[in-house]
Image: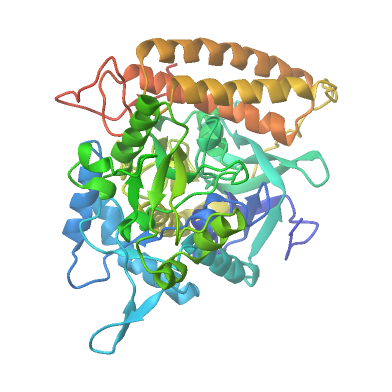
């Protein structure tokens, strides 16, 4: 447990409780901590979130040849008519300032010397972008951001890091049958001591990342189990656009390469997608070829794999000089080399994998959810930025922009909230449950869930597949609810409970969308509808 700077008296009380220790959560902590006592929960190791593994970079306008209007238009086009233009404009307009804050905090993006012998940031280009605007640190941008933010956080006297803690449920006045509906804190599972603790907080922020672990194949780390969406839903918050799950087109297909992503920047620097016979196929699907948006590329790969009956396609950058490859993609080069694959000489076998959750908890421009004092930032949210498909490298940008916006809002409200006294909050009751001697039940349900989500609610969907998935998830809901009621909590049980809840939301959202748009492709409705709206689910009306 990495717990610091706290005392016994204040251990279970804070001003702001942040659930999640990635780019969003740590940025908020740093921005709000000057006059605020902050606690940051990380259910796994501090370096295990999606931020740490993000390769590509962050989109922001840093070139005189580029413009915010162009960035906005690229985002709207990728979002397939479903973006909230105000959210897009808000994010893009705040991009450069947010990136400058990261730089000032210690993040070192790659630079180059231009023709005038001036040092400038090296900007790369990714699918869907009309200009080079991706700030990056080689092919390990997320690691650079995470490590820089962590270093700053660990030095701050008002921030306490709690490693090995899962949030179980949000505590609100409504849940305690008190007036109003404001947040009071959270019940958390202390994995280090295997006990449930109660943390009181005037504000709670969900920064838990996405839900791609709901699928059999994912580029995400194991912690991406949809916890924040499930926590918010059980608390009474609306969610939106859960049917839009982005499948990254290029994950390394290798028995020993679990979850290893091959960044889109490879294609931005000239890598080509090939069939097993060495022929290109992307020009057959889109005039932008390998630089088409991810939904188009992922479906093209899926189509070719099924048409040819093969296990994978290939990504080839071997036509570039070896020095160029090693300079720009050192992590990928070394990882592949360790697996016996020299990408400077041969193509990489690839398959699509679940990568990013475009929908999530509904928030406003301040990160505020439907519950007073409960905020959400980052991939866990629906801001309207991504629409039906996320534009590459807008995700880390969204984390920082909305962390800053939330910090301003909380700072404005914190004084009045500190004057409120916490009501009596009952301790977690384990008097009627026991330790489980049937962990196999959790493992079986876990594997079944992820398999049918991949088969029935994956890249290509049909009404029949979605109905089958709904029937299965409802049975799992019943089984897991019964299991949860009778046995003590554990990390696997908590994650499974959340994943099943999120799976149900994804399926119901997909069923309600009677068209194909962006990341949602249904063979029974292959065309886009003339008009469209976000898919909104409300737990108070379900």
Residue at image point 46% right, 64% down = 329
- In the image, residue 537 above or below residue 185: above
Where is residue 371? Give x, y as percent: 47, 37
Residue at image point 20% right, 57% down = 130
Quadrant containing the N terminus is bottom right
Where is residue 405? Give x, y as percent: 39, 56
**Res 220 seen here:** yes
Where is residue 296? Give x, y as percent: 29, 37
Residue at image point 52% right, 31% down = 215
Q: 421 or 343: nearer the eye?
A: 343
Q: Quadrant of residue 276?
A: top left
Q: Is 149 on the left-hand or right-hand side of 135?
A: right
Q: Is 134 on the left-hand or right-hand side of 283?
A: right
Q: Is 219 on the left-hand or right-hand side of 365?
A: right
Q: Residue furthest bottom?
A: 117
Residue at image point 55% right, 66% down = 149
* Colour style of the rendered protein structure: rainbow
Q: Is 220 on the left-hand or right-hand side of 190?
A: left
Q: Residue furthest front?
A: 277
Quadrant containing the C terminus is top left
Q: 151 or 55: nearer the eye?
A: 55
- In the image, residue 356 above or below residue 484: below
Q: 340 or 203: nearer the eye?
A: 340
**Count of numbered labels shown in the rendering:** 0
Q: Quadrant of residue 328?
A: bottom left
**Res 32 seen here:** no
Where is residue 22? Give x, y as percent: 54, 55
């Amino acid at each position: 447990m990495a717990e610091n700077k706290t005392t016994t008296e204040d251990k279970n009380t804070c001003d702001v409780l942040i659930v999640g220790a990635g780019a969003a959560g740590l940025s908020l902590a740093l921005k709000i901590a000057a006059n605020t006592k902050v606690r940051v929960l990380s259910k796994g190791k501090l370096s295990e979130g999606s931020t740490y593994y993000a390769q590509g970079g962050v989109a922001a306008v840093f070139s005189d040849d580029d413009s915010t209007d162009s960035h906005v238009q690229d985002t709207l086009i990728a979002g397939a008519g479903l973006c909230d233009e105000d959210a897009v404009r808000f994010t893009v307009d705040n991009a450069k300032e947010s990136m400058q804050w990261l730089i000032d905090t210690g993040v070192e993006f790659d630079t180059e010397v231009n023709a005038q012998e001036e040092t400038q940031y090296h900007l790369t280009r990714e699918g869907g972008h009309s200009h080079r605007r991706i700030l990056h640190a080689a092919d390990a941008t997320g690691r650079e951001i995470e490590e820089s933010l962590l270093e700053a956080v660990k030095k701050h006297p008002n921030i306490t890091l709690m490693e090995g803690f899962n949030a179980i449920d949000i505590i609100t006045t409504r849940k305690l049958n008190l007036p109003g509906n404001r947040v009071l804190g959270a019940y958390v599972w202390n994995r280090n001591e295997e006990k449930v603790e109660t943390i009181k907080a005037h504000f709670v922020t969900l920064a838990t990342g996405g839900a791609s672990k709901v699928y059999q194949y994912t580029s995400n780390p194991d912690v991406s189990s949809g916890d924040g969406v499930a926590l918010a839903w059980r608390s009474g918050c609306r969610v939106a656009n859960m049917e839009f799950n982005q499948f990254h087109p290029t994950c390394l297909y290798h028995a020993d390469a679990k979850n290893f992503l091959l960044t889109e920047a490879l294609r931005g620097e000239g890598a080509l997608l090939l069939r097993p016979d060495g022929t290109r196929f992307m020009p057959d699907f889109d005039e932008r070829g390998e630089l088409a948006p991810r939904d188009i590329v992922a479906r093209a790969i899926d189509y070719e794999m099924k048409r040819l009956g093969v296990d994978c396609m290939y990504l080839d950058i071997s036509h570039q000089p070896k020095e160029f490859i090693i300079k720009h993609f050192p992590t990928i080069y070394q990882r592949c080399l360790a697996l016996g694959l020299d990408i400077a000489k041969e193509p990489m076998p690839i398959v699509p994998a679940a990568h990013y959750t475009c929908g999530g908890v509904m928030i406003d421009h301040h990160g505020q959810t439907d519950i007073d004092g409960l905020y959400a930032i980052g991939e866990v949210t629906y801001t309207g930025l991504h629409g039906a498909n996320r534009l590459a490298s807008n995700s880390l940008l969204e984390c920082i922009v909305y962390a800053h916006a939330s910090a301003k809002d909380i700072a404005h409200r914190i004084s009045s909230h500190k004057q409120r006294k916490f009501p009596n909050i009952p301790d977690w009751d384990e008097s009627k449950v026991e330790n489980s001697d049937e962990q196999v039940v959790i493992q079986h349900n876990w594997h079944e869930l992820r398999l049918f989500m991949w088969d029935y609610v994956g890249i290509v969907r049909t009404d029949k597949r979605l109905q089958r998935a709904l029937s299965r998830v409802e049975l799992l809901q019943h089984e897991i609810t019964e299991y949860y009621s009778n046995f003590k909590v554990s990390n696997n049980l908590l994650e499974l409970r959340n994943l099943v809840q999120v799976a149900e939301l994804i399926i119901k959202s997909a069923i309600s969308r009677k068209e194909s748009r962006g990341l949602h492709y249904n063979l029974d409705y292959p065309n886009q509808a003339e008009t469209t709206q976000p898919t909104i689910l409300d737990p108070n009306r379900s």
